[in-house]
Amino acid sequence: MRTSESSAQVDEAEFVSRLRRGDQAAYAELVERSTGRMLALARRMLPTEADAQDAVQDAFLSAVRSLDRFDGRARLTTWLHQITVNACLMKLRSRRRRPERSIEGLLPEFLPDGHQQFPRGPWRAGAAGGIEGDELRAFVRDRIDELPEAYRVVLLLRDLAGLDTQQTAIALNITTDAVRTRLHRARQALKTLLDPYFTEDPS
Amino acid sequence: MTIEQDITCRELIDFLGDYLDGRLEPDRRRCFEDHLRVCRSCVDYLAAYQRTVALGREALASGADADVQDVPPALLEAIKASLRERSD
């Protein structure tokens, strides 16, 4: 008796061989099944809806071109996810850079003796204005969008795309130390952007 | 015998990511913990930083799920057409 997992593997292997044969119905099924998840990822990584849709389209073309290299060790969805991340990174690189705020202004400042210059005090339990749930999550996503791109991308690759430090370093062609530094600074900067909404007004 | 040195708030905050990831040597980790026992502002910073990490992860995960349902039909058709064109 086949377990449901091995049955799913057999089904997937059969589906992949249909794709490799150029079966149009299999292509259509792949698009119907996978576009939602790929577009959701691209929308988070790219600044405009048009960029996100272009990246998903590029990802499908790239996937179909490289189907022969899909070895079946990863799930098809995981493989498409990685291709979408790469398509988004290509899009980010090709885009003209817009002027953006420097990360320095969002990092904590220190006195010459090493103490924090402007400690913010403890965060309260809820955000200002009582926002919570979906509204709070959308608010946090908007603050993430304000981060400088080099830092925002690392945060997205780690916390959205699910890449580990090594995979992020390879995707961005930087060292693992640089990934750790950028991730830490991205989180520090996000904290700074959230501080006013979670601390008591000092005035 | 190792001589433990006091660390500053700056060192603690600069290496907070490594501290939370368990990447510090045991002696250095002990210095961080000693500092956190006496420095209220670093305890506040650490708590807010950890909450930021959690809020960020939650915000990104939830947004992606909501978007999965929202696919323009024209995009689906455009992708199918481009794949058909490619295989013709």
Image (cartoon, rainbow, N blue to C red):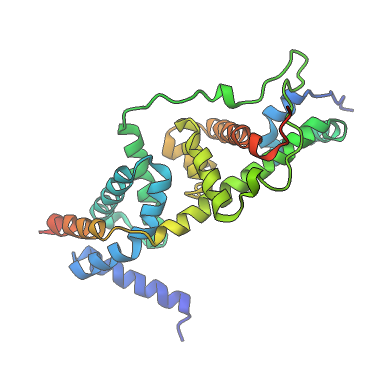
Q: Position of residue A3 (x, y in %)?
A: 48, 80
Q: Quadrant of residue A197?
A: top right
A49 relative to B9, above or below? below
Q: Quadrant of residue A32?
A: bottom left
A187 left or right, relative to B33: left
Q: Is residue A175 visible?
A: yes
B87 relative to B9, above or below? below
Q: Residue at x 68, y 30 (%)?
A: B15
Q: Residue at x 22, y 56 (%)?
A: B79
Q: Position of residue A20 (x, y in %)?
A: 23, 63
Q: Residue at x 84, y 24 (%)?
A: B6
Q: Is residue B21 visible?
A: no
B47 left or right, relative to A68: right
Q: Quadrant of the C terminus of chain A?
A: top right
A194 left or right, relative to A59: right
Count of number-bearing discs: 0
Q: Residue at x 56, y 31 (%)?
A: A177
